[in-house]
Image: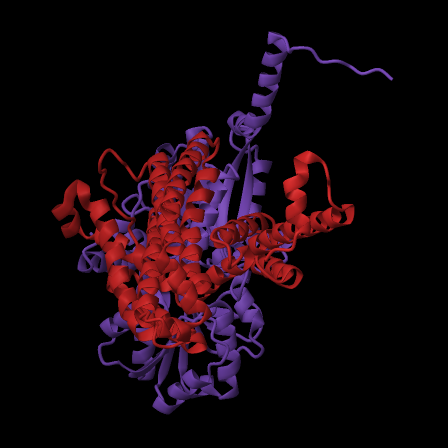
């Protein structure tokens, strides 16, 4: 019952969050707010889906951006196909969306089945190898992908259900809705018994296996889920940029997602999202004044890592928890020093305080 | 001590406060609406190995903007250039372009990106409907392929296919003259390098069918060590070499290849060698390398071109490059278009004014440059080859290709590719 209650609470929070995002996006005086938020939706999903692997399952993937980019490329290529547009007409965008996620999920399944048998650095480097393989395919298959110049000619977006994705407001609301639903999916997965199974696998895979859990299957499901959500991020970015580019699946893109997680916090659900906000914001601010963006972001991450020794949200949560514990301890010791309060109102409490529990 | 007490605010106070608040919130919009300046957004490459080209673009653009402002601006409205670094990354170029329009209030875009970034900018300005002139991308497809064409986008830059026709004619004559039938290539392994090299060799073979390519070497972009490529070339012993390496890559390749005596062993054609920063950066510039007419104060050999060269150098610490003259010319076209619309930055109106426009220019072979109406691209700029000298002016004996020849083969190329 408690799980069900928290599920409904999450849905309520998601609805409120979506309403706030839509309001902020529509009410914004300049398009900058919508642009910033839209790119944040894309990179936020990349970071949060990666944290399903790193933070929840304990699988440090160096090749996660491959799924992000594959989603964008599949979506763009499907919509650039005149045959596809003719076949699905006004329904082309939703069909391309679903197919792009499905294609990415199948690729994630293939990669996951191979990589999830390994652990630690071997897993990390094999995922990187698959990412660079895909990167090479995109660069070499110029006729299909445009090679290093990315998808050219724009992405057609036929109107569906009254939604015109070439309109900035429609596109923003659509991306916001897709983002919130994707976050909700991640939340449901991590808060479900399956999510706790993943944490058990992260903390002690051998013990999980002894308890009868099929560890490989759970890891592969986690891998496919994370890849699918990352592909949604790629689709949002493809819609935003009206193209797809090989840089999205270069190894440094996966590295950037790991930086976001490190910056925001690995142990909190919204830590990676905070990291994405900070990194994008820092990048935008620095870019306005100097071309040394990478130096500035590097210094910021270094300061967080050396100064806090964990992500910002992890640090804040630990700080609040420690203060609360210290307050409780000091209250308890103060209560002991005061001795028993004999007033009739506090008789029961006094008895509980001074009477040793059995 | 007395305290000032605040009663319930009157209707007038509320209205005053609301007006003040609205004024503060709307200040940027009001400033833009007043149109005190017209802001030109310029994404380019300011970091990394080819940053010097972006820096020369920025210097040239600033020079053109200063000249326009000194001449009274656009009906008294001044121009302002806002430059941002894309690091040559397409997704960063997209983001920077959007920010320039949406955050910085730029109403037109001068895209001084290399090819990868330009395609990204092209899609962005198509999406947000902002007038744009590309000034540095040479990949022919950018404006030749119908799917990339955008009504309000133009390209003020040399084009790969134009260079390929000129280079092919030059190389074919060279081959016939010196009996060079075995060619090798060493070009960067990305879209520009591959398409440029393929087009160059295609036209060389077309005009001299007896030649063959015996070795192809594809160094990665920004590769530090070219030993492997140099060894491959030496082992295959071609009689002539073609390279479209550029910027810092070309300097590194020349410095390393000179150690192996590569340029003593066969004729070399390097289309991108003729940029001053490259020519001055190579430690021991070999004599007799065939180079394209990138930027030279003597091509075209006119008083106007020499004067521009002097003015630019007085204005900028960065040497002039191919990117510099193209970006300068891009701003000149933009200024003329803005004058024609009376400062109206509506994309369609500016496009209407720019289509088929001809301006007087120190870089035009006949004193003018034209943005062709049919595909919005630049013609009548110098296309030719000369031979290197170890000291200034570094290149001599330029042989120019006539534009009617270039246009004839370009039209055929377009038809063959289904672009016409």
> What chain is colored red?
A
Where B401 sits versus B99, above or below?
below
Q: Position of residue A4 (x, y in %)?
A: 35, 45
Question: Residue at horizontal 22%, vertical 50%?
Answer: A96
Q: Nearer the viewer, residue A198 or B181?
A: A198
Outermost bottom residue: B235
Q: In which quadrant is the C terminus of chain A drawn?
A: bottom right
Does residue A117 appear to the left or right of A78 in the view shown?
A: right
Name the colour assigned to chain B in the rendering.
Answer: purple
Q: Nearer the viewer, residue B133 or A290?
A: A290
Q: Position of residue A353 (x, y in %)?
A: 67, 49
Quadrant location of residue A120?
bottom left
Where A85 sits versus A26, above or below?
below
**Residue B293 appears in the figure:** no
Outermost left residue: A87
Question: Residue at horizontal 47%, vertical 64%?
Answer: A255
Q: Nearer the viewer, residue B153 or A65?
A: A65
Q: Position of residue A203 (x, y in %)?
A: 46, 69
């Amino acid at each position: 019952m408690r799980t069900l209650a928290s599920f409904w609470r999450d849905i309520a929070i998601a609805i409120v969050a979506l309403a706030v995002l839509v309001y902020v996006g529509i009410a914004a005086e300049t398009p900058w707010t919508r642009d910033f938020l839209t790119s944040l939706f894309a990179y936020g999903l990349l970071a949060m889906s990666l944290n399903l692997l790193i933070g929840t399952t304990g699988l440090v993937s160096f090749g996660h951006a491959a799924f992000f980019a594959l989603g964008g490329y599949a979506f763009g290529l499907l919509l650039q196909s005149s045959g596809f547009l003719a076949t699905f007409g006004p329904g082309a965008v939703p069909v391309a969306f679903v197919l792009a996620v499905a294609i990415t999920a199948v690729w994630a399944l293939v990669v996951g089945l191979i990589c999830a048998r390994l652990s630690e650095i071997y897993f990390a480097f094999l995922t990187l190898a698959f990412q660079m393989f895909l990167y090479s395919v995109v660069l070499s298959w110029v006729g299909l992908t445009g090679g290093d110049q990315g998808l050219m000619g724009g992405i057609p977006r036929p109107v569906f259900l009254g939604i015109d994705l070439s309109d900035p407001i429609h596109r923003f609301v659509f991306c916001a809705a897709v983002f919130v639903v994707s976050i909700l999916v991640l939340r449901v997965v991590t808060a479900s018994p399956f999510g706790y199974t993943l944490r058990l696998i992260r903390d002690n895979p051998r013990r999980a296996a002894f308890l009868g859990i099929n560890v490989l299957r759970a890891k592969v499901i986690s891998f496919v889920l994370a890849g699918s959500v990352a592909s949604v991020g790629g689709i949002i970015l493809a819609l935003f940029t009206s193209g797809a580019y090989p840089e999205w699946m270069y190894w440094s893109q996966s590295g950037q997602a790991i930086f976001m997680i490190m910056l925001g916090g690995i142990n909190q659900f919204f830590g990676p999202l905070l990291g994405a906000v900070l990194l994008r914001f820092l990048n935008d601010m620095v870019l306005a004044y100097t071309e040394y963006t990478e130096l500035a972001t590097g210094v910021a991450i270094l300061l967080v890592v050396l100064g806090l020794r964990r992500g910002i949200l992890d640090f804040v949560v630990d700080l609040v928890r420690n203060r609360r514990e210290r307050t409780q301890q000091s209250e308890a010791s103060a209560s002991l020093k005061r001795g028993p309060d004999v007033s009739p109102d506090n008789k029961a409490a006094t008895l509980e305080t001074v009477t040793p529990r059995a | 001590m007395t305290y000032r007490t605040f009663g319930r605010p009157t209707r007038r106070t509320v209205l005053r406060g609301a007006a003040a608040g609205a004024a503060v919130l709307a200040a940027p919009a009001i400033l833009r609406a007043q149109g005190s300046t017209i802001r030109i957004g310029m994404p380019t490459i300011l970091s990394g190995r080819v940053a010097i080209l972006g820096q020369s673009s920025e210097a040239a653009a600033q020079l053109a903007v200063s000249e326009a402002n000194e001449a009274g601006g656009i009906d008294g409205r001044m121009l302002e250039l806002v430059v941002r670094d894309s690091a040559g990354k397409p997704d960063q170029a997209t983001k920077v372009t959007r920010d320039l329009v949406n955050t910085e209030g730029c109403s037109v875009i001068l895209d001084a990106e290399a090819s990868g970034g330009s395609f990204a900018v092209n899609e962005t300005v198509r999406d947000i409907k902002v007038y744009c002139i590309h000034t540095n991308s040479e990949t022919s497809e950018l404006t030749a392929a119908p799917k990339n064409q955008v009504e309000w986008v133009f390209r003020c830059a040399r084009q790969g296919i134009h260079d390929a026709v000129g280079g092919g004619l030059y190389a074919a004559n060279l081959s016939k003259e010196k009996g060079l039938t075995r060619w090798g290539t060493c070009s960067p392994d990305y879209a520009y390098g591959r398409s440029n090299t393929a087009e160059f060799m295609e036209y060389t073979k077309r005009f001299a069918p007896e030649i063959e390519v015996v070795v192809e070497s594809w160094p990665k972009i920004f590769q530090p060590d070219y030993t492997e490529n140099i060894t491959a070339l030496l082992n295959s012993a071609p009689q002539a070499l073609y390279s479209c390496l550029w910027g810092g890559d070309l300097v590194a390749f020349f410095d390393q290849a000179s150690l192996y005596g590569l340029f003593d062993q066969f004729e070399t054609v390097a289309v991108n060698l003729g940029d001053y920063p490259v020519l001055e950066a190579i430690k021991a510039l070999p004599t007799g390398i065939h180079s394209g007419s990138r930027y030279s104060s003597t091509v075209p050999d006119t008083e106007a071109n020499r004067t521009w060269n002097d003015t630019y150098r007085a204005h900028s610490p960065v040497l002039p490059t191919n990117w510099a003259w193209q970006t300068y010319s891009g701003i000149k076209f933009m200024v003329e278009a803005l004058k024609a619309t009376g400062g109206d930055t509506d994309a369609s109106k500016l496009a209407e004014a720019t289509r088929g426009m001809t301006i007087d220019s120190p870089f035009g072979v006949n004193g003018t440059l034209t943005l062709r109406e049919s595909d919005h691209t630049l013609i009548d700029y110098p296309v030719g080859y000369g031979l290197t000298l170890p000291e200034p002016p570094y290149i001599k004996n330029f042989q120019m290709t006539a534009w009617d020849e270039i246009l004839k083969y370009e039209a055929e190329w377009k038809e063959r590719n289904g672009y016409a």
